[in-house]
Image (tube, rainbow, N blue to C red):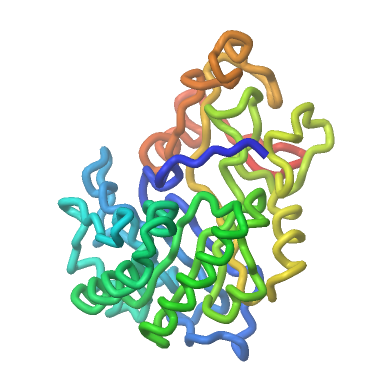
């Protein structure tokens, strides 16, 4: 599987840029009672810069009654465990409206994981997260590491989540996990600390690959000429099968992207980008552009020469 880690790449449009829906959520096994009469977890990710987009999307526009959890994205950390909070991130209205609706709001956190491993500042990071959450009214944390790969990484992630759980037993804790990063997740041990895992079933291909792939197919098409770009876990069905081998279904959420990729120089599914023969990395690179649903696609659904078509195999538009 080709590595394609870009910080918060997938979270650059609006809520929900990603929507996570539980694979199965029996009420008897839920650690937290679900709000809004919902029978499954529905987790939306909200990025602070979406309110500056055109059109803007802010806290007052979020359909809280349709959600159980919100991941608030934008904060990162460095090798010393110090949190970097960008200007404009803090939105008291978001936290107040979320809690008024009975919904949980979590801090989505990514950063210099390798640096923390090297410096040994893991407890400093945990303490800083706990202080931030208490000061600003967050209910837990969603850890976004793209991607743990080594045995050291595996052990570090288990340790980090265990320390976060110990710092506040009532936290809602989750991680974002990709099927192609399977070795990096010691899921048996992680289950002891996590409420659930958000499965990243999207972004197997894009500017960093050479062929025109679907962003998040429900079912895998065996006619794909470049399966190595997306396997293992190249479809929702395949990804679910991978994680269900080691994780109870009630601890899994399946991620759904509300964006896609426009391939500017190919006209058919699985086509090879012509420029891939000349780019330094052999990939599509700038010939592919990310396109957001709320910012671009929504206004063009069945309008302006656009029409809706579903792939007969993958069953996605």
Q: Where residue 252 sits in the image (x, y, percent)? A: 62, 69
Task: Depth check: give the residue in front, 141 or 119.
Answer: 119
Task: Depth check: give the residue in front, 314 or 276.
Answer: 276
Residue at image location 66% in from the left, 53% down from the top: 179
Residue at the far right in the pictured view: 222
Residue at image location 16% in from the left, 51% down from the top: 87
Residue at the far bottom in the pictured view: 28
Residue at the far front in the pictured view: 119
Task: Depth check: give the residue in front, 32 or 281.
Answer: 281
* Residue 63 in view, yes or no: no
Q: How many marks?
A: 0
Q: Where residue 266 sits in the image (x, y, percent)? A: 61, 16
In the image, residue 177 sits, relative to residue 180, either above or below, namely below
Q: Indicate left or right for 132 with 270 as reference.
A: left
The quarter of the rendered structure image containing the N terminus is top right
Residue at image location 63% in from the left, 52% down from the top: 181
The quarter of the rendered structure image containing the C terminus is top right
Residue at image location 56% in from the left, 75% down from the top: 40
Q: Where residue 267 sits in the image (x, y, percent)? A: 63, 17
In the image, residue 111 sits, relative to residue 168, either above or below, namely above
In the image, residue 101 sits, relative to residue 253, either above or below, namely below
Q: Indicate left or right for 19 with 112 as reference.
A: right
Q: Identify the image quadrant of residue 109.
A: bottom left
* Residue 23 in view, yes or no: yes
In the image, residue 188 sits, relative to residue 201, either above or below, namely below
Q: Where residue 18 sits in the image (x, y, percent)? A: 47, 53
């Amino acid at each position: 599987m080709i590595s394609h880690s870009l910080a918060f790449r997938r979270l650059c449009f609006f809520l929900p840029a990603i929507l996570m829906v539980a694979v199965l959520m029996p009420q008897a096994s839920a650690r937290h009672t679900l709000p809004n009469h919902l029978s499954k977890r529905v987790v939306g990710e909200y990025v602070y810069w979406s309110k500056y987009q055109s059109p803007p999307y802010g806290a007052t526009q979020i359909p809280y009654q349709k959600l159980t959890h919100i991941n608030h994205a934008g904060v990162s950390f460095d090798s010393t465990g110090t949190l970097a909070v960008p200007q404009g991130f803090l939105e008291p209205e978001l936290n107040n409206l979320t809690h008024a609706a009975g919904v949980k709001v979590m801090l989505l956190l990514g950063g210099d994981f390798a640096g923390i491993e090297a410096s040994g500042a893991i407890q400093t990071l945990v303490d800083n997260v706990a202080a931030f959450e208490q000061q600003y009214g967050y209910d837990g944390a969603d850890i976004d590491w793209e991607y743990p790969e080594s045995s050291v990484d595996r052990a570090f992630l288990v340790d980090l989540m265990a320390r976060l759980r110990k710092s506040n037993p009532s936290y809602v804790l989750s991680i974002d996990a990709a099927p192609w990063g399977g070795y990096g997740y010691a899921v048996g041990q992680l289950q002891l600390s996590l409420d659930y895992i958000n499965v990243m079933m999207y972004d197997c291909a894009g500017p960093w690959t050479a062929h025109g792939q679907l962003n998040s197919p429900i079912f895998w098409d065996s006619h794909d000429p470049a399966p190595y770009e997306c396997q293992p876990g190249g479809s929702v069905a395949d990804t679910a099968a991978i994680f269900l081998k080691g994780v109870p279904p009630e601890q899994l959420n399946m991620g759904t992207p509300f964006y896609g990729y426009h391939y500017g120089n190919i006209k058919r599914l699985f086509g090879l980008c012509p420029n891939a023969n000349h780019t330094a990395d052999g990939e599509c690179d700038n010939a592919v552009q990310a396109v957001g649903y709320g910012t671009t696609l929504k206004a063009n659904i069945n309008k302006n020469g656009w029409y809706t078509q579903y792939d007969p195999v993958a069953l996605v538009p």
